[in-house]
Each structure stands twice: as structure tokens, then as C-alpha cells.
Image (cartoon, rainbow, N blue to C red):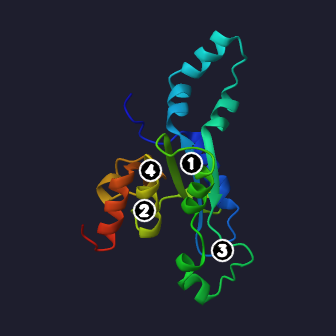
Amino acid sequence: MERPVEPPYWVIEAARVAATGSPCQKSKRGAAVYNLNEVDDILEGRARDRAAFFGVPYRETVCQQDSIVAVAHNAPPAGWTCTGSEACRKDCGKLCRHAEERAIHTAGRITSFERLALVHVKVVDGQVVAGGPPSCWQCSRLVADCGIRGIWLYELVSLGELYTSPPGKGGRWRFYEAKEFHRATLAHEGIEL
């Protein structure tokens, strides 16, 4: 099966809802880890076929929710609060746990990673907005190390792509295999392997 051009809408929505719960006053982020195999089964109708074979009622919403392994948002560690001060904003990435880090940590307690992918979103006023390219070396290192298959980012598009993207979008979904994601992040930081 060819990889889709964007992650499943219900996974995007789970990450978006998680992001809206972030206490961060600088940048609200959310992440959802989901099982690629189960999503493939849902999208190709195999989940429905299995339900029919076993004589079990098929409920697409339940199947969709079951494909999501973990959701999380960015936030300071327990017992700390986001003050929104200039110092807090300046060192936000060092003070807070990132959404993808929290989601991967939770997912790791539940299942193995090789069948999983992660959707990472940025929200403004509750809506998913395009962010920049892979840029957090701590999270890309974690993604590469844990064995997760890859990560979806909703990225800003280049000026040339802006004219061909859907109206009002200004972004596109891109899937990075784990190693590709880490390499792109390191390149963004000026680190060459």
C-alpha cells in the first residue's frame, strides 16, 4: 500500500485536542502516537472484514480510537508552571517536556514501537497551523532511538508550493522515517554526520 499524503484525520484531531490542553504560553504543541498497521486495516476495510468474520458489530469510531496508542501536550514537569515570562519563553525548550517526548514515553509502556508513527501539531487558537522543518534535536534523537517508524509534521510550504496548495492551508503534511527525521533535524542545526 502506498503511503497516504497525510495522517488519518482522527489522529490529527487527537493531537490537536491534546495541544489545546497545553499550559505553555509560548507555543502549544500536541502529539499522538498511533498504530500504522491498525490504521492500514481500517483504511483498507480489513477491520470491517474481520468483524464480519467473527460476527462482531463493526464500529469505525471505536476502531479509529483504538489505533491511537498515546496523546500528549507540551508542559513543564509535574509541580512546575508556565509563567509566560520572558525568561520562561526564552528557555521553554529546556524547561518543558515536549509533546512528542511525553507521547513516546507513554506509548513505550504500552507496546513496541516498530508499528507506530507519531503526528506532531502546533495549534494557534485551537487550530492546527504549519510549523517549521524538523528542528528539535532532543526529540529527533528520541524518535530515532526508540524504534518508532516515523513522524508526521505539518510544515510551512515554500513560496512555489504555496500557489499549488489548497486555499488557506499554507502548509502540507510530510512523513519522515525516523532516521530521515533525525538527519533533517541535525542538518537544520548545522550538524553533519
**Residue beneath the point at 50% across and 37% down:** 36
- Dot placed on the residue nearer the N-terminal end, 4 or 2: 2
Instruction: Return the mark for residue 140.
Output: 2
**Residue beneath the point at 47% across and 52% down:** 169
Callouts 2 and 1 close, C-beta under 8 Å: no
Q: Which amino acid does label 4 sit on?
A: Gly
Q: Which amino acid does label 2 sit on?
A: Ser
Q: How far apart are marks 4 and 1 (CA)?
A: 13 Å
User: Which residue is nearer to you in this view: 25 or 102?
Assistant: 102
Which of labels 4 and 2 is toward the front? 4
Q: What residue type is labelled 1?
A: Val
- Dot placed on the residue nearer the N-terminal end, 3 or 4: 3
Q: Mark 1 points at which residue?
A: 33
Which of labels 4 and 1 is toward the front? 4
Which of labels 3 and 4 is toward the front? 4
User: Which residue is nearer to you in this view: 149 or 7?
Assistant: 149
* Residue 107 image position (x, y, % from top left): 60, 50
- Dot placed on the residue nearer the N-terminal end, 1 or 3: 1
* Residue 136 in view, yes or no: no
Q: How far apart are marks 4 and 2 (CA)?
A: 11 Å
User: Which residue is nearer to you in this view: 131 or 32?
Assistant: 32
Q: Distance between the residues labelled 2 and 3?
A: 19 Å
**Residue beneath the point at 37% across and 31% down:** 2
- Dot placed on the residue nearer the N-terminal end, 2 or 3: 3
Q: Mark 4 points at which residue?
A: 147
Q: Mark 3 points at which residue?
A: 76
* Residue 116 image position (x, y, % from top left): 50, 43
